[in-house]
């Protein structure tokens, strides 16, 4: 692990497709499943059109091969509302329901889903660090927690994503994960372990994380990006806050690339990463 800053590292997106799959997970997740070709292509095409992330999921613990499995489409829209659609599947062809669900608005409101990356076939660190986190969170919130395939940022394992909130956390262990998710479910997001909000771009994510670090935990929508300007590798970001938080905060963020080195446990080559550093925070 490289020790890179985790601020500003959440992949962009607001739609998640979850497919319960109790068998072994291929290194490339859904893409590697041996499913009926037409159905697989239908799901992939619909997900790509919506820029949805497709994740295989399963409950922690012994695998239970019997019975039908679940699927879900979860969305976080621009107003902050959550939408969902759930279904079941036992034959490959049943998964075509996902494409139809992606084309429909879905039901308003849903419980959050806590996704713990344990995808050891993709990167060993995800299994080694993720499974203890999956176990302790599943014991605490058995109805909310799923283990999942690759979510991005293996070097930040253990990674946890709360969907459809679109909040990424990294560098967790069994103890810290309980505290982080407990706070999240109470709508108190802490800066520590926060990788970012997926509806924001990386410099904006870093700015919000820095504001949370400076002024303390806040709700998912207590801070809003009001304005963003860029000058080469530097951003100026204005954030507005709900009372009793500051009404306006100006944050400057600078980006730089790290020297090439091994990115992940299974990384095939040397590579560099973009790191975002907050250089200034000022109440507007």
Image: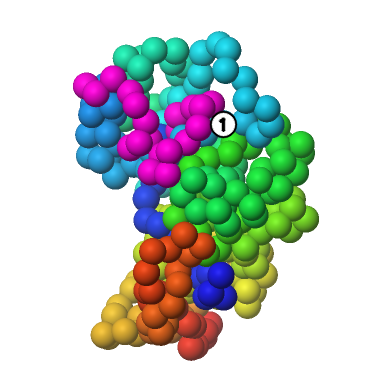
- Above or below for 143 versus 151: above
Which residue is label 1 attached to? 58
Q: Left or right: where does residue 95 sit relative to residue 152?
A: left
Q: Left or right: where does residue 112 sit relative to residue 55?
A: right
Of residue 105 and residue 153, the one placed in the foreground of this image is 153
Spot the residue most to the bottom. 279
> Magenta stretch: residue 85 in it?
no
- Above or below for 142 versus 155: above
Q: How far from the left and from the top, in percent, is residue 129?
A: 65, 54
Q: How far from the left and from the top, in percent, is residue 187?
A: 64, 51
> Magenta stretch: residue 33 in it?
yes
Model colouring: rainbow
Which of the image's four quarters has the N terminus?
bottom right
- Above or below for 116 versus 253: above
Q: Which residue is drawn at 46% across and 25% down?
A: 71
Q: In which quarter of the image is residue 54?
A: top left
* Magenta-tinted stretch: 18-38
Is residue 60 at all visible to an observer of this figure? yes
Q: Which residue is drawn at 47% across and 82% down?
A: 277
Q: How far from the left and from the top, in percent, is residue 190?
A: 65, 63
Q: Quadrant of residue 145?
A: top right
Q: How far from the left and from the top, in percent, is residue 69?
A: 51, 19
């Amino acid at each position: 692990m490289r020790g890179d800053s985790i601020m500003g590292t959440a992949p962009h997106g607001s739609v998640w497709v979850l497919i319960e799959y109790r068998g072994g997970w291929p290194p490339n997740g859904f893409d590697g499943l041996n499913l009926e070709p037409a159905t697989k292509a239908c799901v992939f095409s619909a997900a790509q059109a919506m820029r949805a992330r497709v994740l295989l999921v399963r409950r922690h613990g012994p695998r239970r091969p019997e019975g039908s499995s679940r699927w879900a489409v979860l969305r976080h829209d621009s107003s902050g509302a959550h939408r969902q659609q759930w279904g079941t599947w036992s034959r490959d062809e049943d998964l075509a329901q996902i494409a139809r669900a992606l084309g429909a608005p879905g039901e308003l409101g849903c419980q959050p889903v806590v996704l713990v990356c344990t995808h050891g076939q993709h990167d060993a660190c995800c299994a080694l660090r993720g499974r203890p986190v999956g176990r302790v969170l599943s014991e605490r919130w058995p109805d909310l927690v799923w283990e999942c395939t690759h979510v991005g940022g293996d070097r930040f394992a253990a990674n946890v994503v709360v969907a459809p909130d679109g909040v990424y956390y990294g560098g967790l262990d069994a103890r810290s994960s309980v505290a982080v998710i407990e706070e999240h479910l109470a709508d108190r997001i802490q800066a520590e372990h926060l990788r970012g909000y997926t509806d924001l771009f990386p410099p904006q994510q870093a700015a919000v994380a820095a504001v949370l670090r400076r002024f303390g935990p806040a709700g998912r929508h207590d801070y809003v990006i009001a304005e963003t300007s860029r000058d080469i590798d530097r951003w100026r970001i204005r954030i507005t806050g709900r009372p009793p938080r500051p009404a306006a905060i100006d944050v400057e963020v600078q980006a730089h690339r790290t020297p090439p080195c091994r990115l992940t446990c299974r990384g095939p080559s040397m590579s560099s990463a973009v790191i975002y550093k907050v250089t200034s925070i000022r109440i507007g």
